[in-house]
């Protein structure tokens, strides 16, 4: 930032003493403090000795011994790109003017100098210097805050990487979106996510403040509800006045007790987390979600559950917006971004907001062992959705292409054909095309075995049907019935029917 005492100080450079004197007088009369130099070398010495930040603009002649005004501009910009230059040229030297502007000069004046034009050009140059230095200071501060966020993220996750995966992709150096995790005394792992309203440096500071306060309280034994209520009261009392919501924070807190398998979640304004079981199947859960902190006095209580295993996945609204733009399930985007050595740029180039995604492994023990199955898709269809089957298939295909970009095209064709047949079967025979019934579609990925599992479940009455006996009969007779099931068995490496045929599970080795 330019020191206040330097905001009116100029350096004027000209090898012609008369021109130098005239320029000095004009600028002194305009209220500036002026230092003078007779050519390139003494001008550079002044700038190096006193520092470029001691000046807010340089007015220099172009043609001088020892170096041109453009040479001086190049040397100075290598030291300080924020210091603006006004270059004086002879009338008609358009090529010099164009070259000077390309090199970063903020303006030029013709010689002989007209006082009014000189004052206008210098005033614009001074304003440009002040603005550029303000931007530079903001960028430096943002970078420092961003480095603090990344350091905090690294310190917090280093001790819990055996259980938690986090990908954090801010659009700028610092972000109001942030996530951190840490292990407290005993066996409790805590994950905190925040999204402060706004995308400026202030939002990043407030996000860091929230995480610092929350961690301090939690490490002293406070439950998530107490932390959120304390911060909500602070926002309402100190930051938001007169009924105006100047600052709000969407916050999500997760506590995992390793030895007991107890899970507690408190969601205030975040997209709904997805809980999956040990098989990687996303399961329905209570969708209790309060407003962002700073809106209202009430803060909801935490949801608790006991888990024998599985995965908890959640993400920022930036990821959800990206999934909407790509027209896929957010689970597919989260999996792609969390995958080791993922080509994230292929997706995040479409992002318009900060992104993070978190995947926490659940179950007993401080460090869960064994590979985890993770969810890729959860979709609930109305029983009368058969007319949209082509659009639905396109959606499933996009989801799998995003989640598993190296999926073989021929194998993808088999997967889509089997999934389509299973969904049609559920809509026609399970739901009888009734809007009062539904079909749930789930996809799960087991990376260790490179197995894609699909589960299609309808809420129909089911049936008594022996697929093995039907296949045996079909081997000797031409049977038209249940060709879809036979096709699914032939396409998938494994096919299971459960719950009277209302649940079909297929596994594809990829």
Image: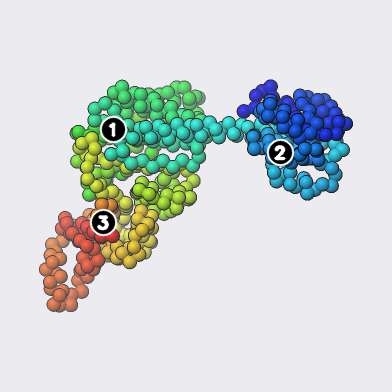
Q: Earlier in the sequence, mark 3 or mark 1?
A: 1
Indicate left or right for 109 with 238 as reference.
Answer: right
**Looking at this rendering, what residue extends furthest in the front direction?**
66
Residue at coordinates 25% horizontally, 49% vertically from top-left? 373
Q: Is residue 249 above or below residue 458?
A: above
Q: Residue at x 50, y 40 (%)?
A: 172
According to the image, label 1 marks what residue?
A: 189
Of labels 2 and 3, earlier in sequence is 2
How crowded is the residue under tag 3: few (<14 C-alpha within 10 Å), some, or many (20+)?
some
Question: Quarter-wise, where is residue 216 in the image?
Answer: top left
Residue 382, percent from left and from top: 31, 55
Residue at horizontal 26 percent and vertical 26 percent from the top:
185
Q: Residues within 10 Å of mark 2 (few under 14, many from 20)?
A: many
- Residue 241 lies, in percent from the top left, at 49, 24
- Asked where in the image residue 452 lies, by quadrant, the reply is bottom left
- Left or right of 308? Residue 406 is right
Identify residue for label 3.
451
Say which label, 1 or 2, has the lower sequence index.
2
Position of 443 compared to 85: left or right? left
Disc 2/disc 3 C-alpha distance (Å)? 62 Å
Residue 471 vertical placement versus 234 (above, below): below
From the image, tell me which residue sits under label 2: 73
- Label 3 element class: strand
Name the foreground residue: 116 vs 6.
Answer: 6
């Amino acid at each position: 930032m330019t020191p206040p005492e330097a905001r009116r100080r100029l350096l004027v450079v000209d090898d012609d003493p008369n021109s130098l004197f005239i320029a000095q007088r004009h600028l002194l009369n305009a209220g500036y403090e002026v230092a003078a130099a007779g050519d390139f070398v003494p001008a550079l010495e002044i700038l190096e000795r006193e520092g470029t930040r001691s000046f807010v603009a340089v007015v220099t002649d172009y043609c001088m011994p020892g170096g041109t005004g453009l040479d001086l501009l190049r040397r100075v910009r290598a030291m300080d790109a924020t210091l603006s230059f006004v270059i004086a040229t002879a009338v008609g030297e358009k090529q010099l003017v164009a070259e000077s502007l390309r090199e970063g000069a903020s303006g030029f004046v013709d010689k002989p100098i007209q006082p009014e034009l000189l004052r206008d050009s210098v005033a614009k140059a001074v304003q440009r210097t002040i603005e550029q230095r303000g931007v530079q200071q903001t960028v430096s501060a943002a970078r420092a805050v961003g480095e603090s966020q990344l350091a905090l993220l690294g310190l917090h996750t280093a001790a819990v990487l055996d259980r938690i995966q986090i990908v954090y992709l801010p659009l700028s150096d610092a972000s109001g979106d942030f996530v951190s995790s840490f292990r407290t005394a005993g066996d409790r792992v805590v994950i905190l996510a925040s999204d402060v309203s706004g995308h400026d440096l202030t939002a990043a500071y407030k996000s860091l403040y929230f995480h610092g306060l929350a961690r301090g309280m939690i490490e002293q034994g406070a439950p998530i509800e107490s932390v959120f209520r304390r911060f909500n009261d602070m926002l309402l009392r100190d930051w938001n006045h007169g009924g105006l919501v100047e600052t709000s924070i969407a916050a999500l807190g997760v506590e995992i007790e390793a030895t007991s398998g107890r899970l507690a979640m408190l969601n205030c304004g975040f997209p709904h987390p997805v809980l999956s079981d040990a098989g990687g199947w996303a399961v329905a859960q209570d969708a209790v979600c309060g407003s962002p902190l700073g809106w209202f006095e009430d803060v909801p209580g935490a949801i608790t559950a006991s888990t024998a295993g599985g995965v908890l996945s959640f993400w920022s609204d930036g990821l959800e917006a990206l999934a909407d733009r790509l027209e896929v399930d957010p689970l597919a985007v989260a999996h792609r971004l969390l995958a080791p050595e993922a080509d994230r740029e292929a997706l995040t180039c479409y992002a318009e907001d900060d992104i993070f995604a978190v995947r926490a492994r659940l179950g007993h023990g401080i460090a869960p062992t064994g590979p985890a199955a993770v969810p890729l898709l959860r979709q609930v269809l109305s029983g009368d959705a058969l007319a949209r089957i082509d659009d639905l298939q396109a959606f499933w295909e996009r989801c799998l292409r995003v989640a598993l970009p190296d999926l073989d095209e021929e194998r993808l064709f088999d997967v889509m054909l089997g999934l389509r047949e299973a969904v049609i079967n559920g809509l026609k025979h399970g739901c009888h095309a009734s809007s009062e019934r539904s079909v749930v579609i789930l996809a799960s990925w087991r990376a260790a075995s490179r197995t894609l599992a699909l589960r299609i479940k309808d809420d129909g009455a089911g049936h008594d049907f022996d697929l093995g006996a039907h296949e045996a009969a079909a081997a000797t007779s031409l049977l038209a019935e249940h060709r879809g099931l036979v096709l699914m068995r032939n396409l998938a490496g494994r096919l299971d029917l459960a719950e009277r045929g209302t649940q079909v599970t297929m596994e594809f080795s990829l």
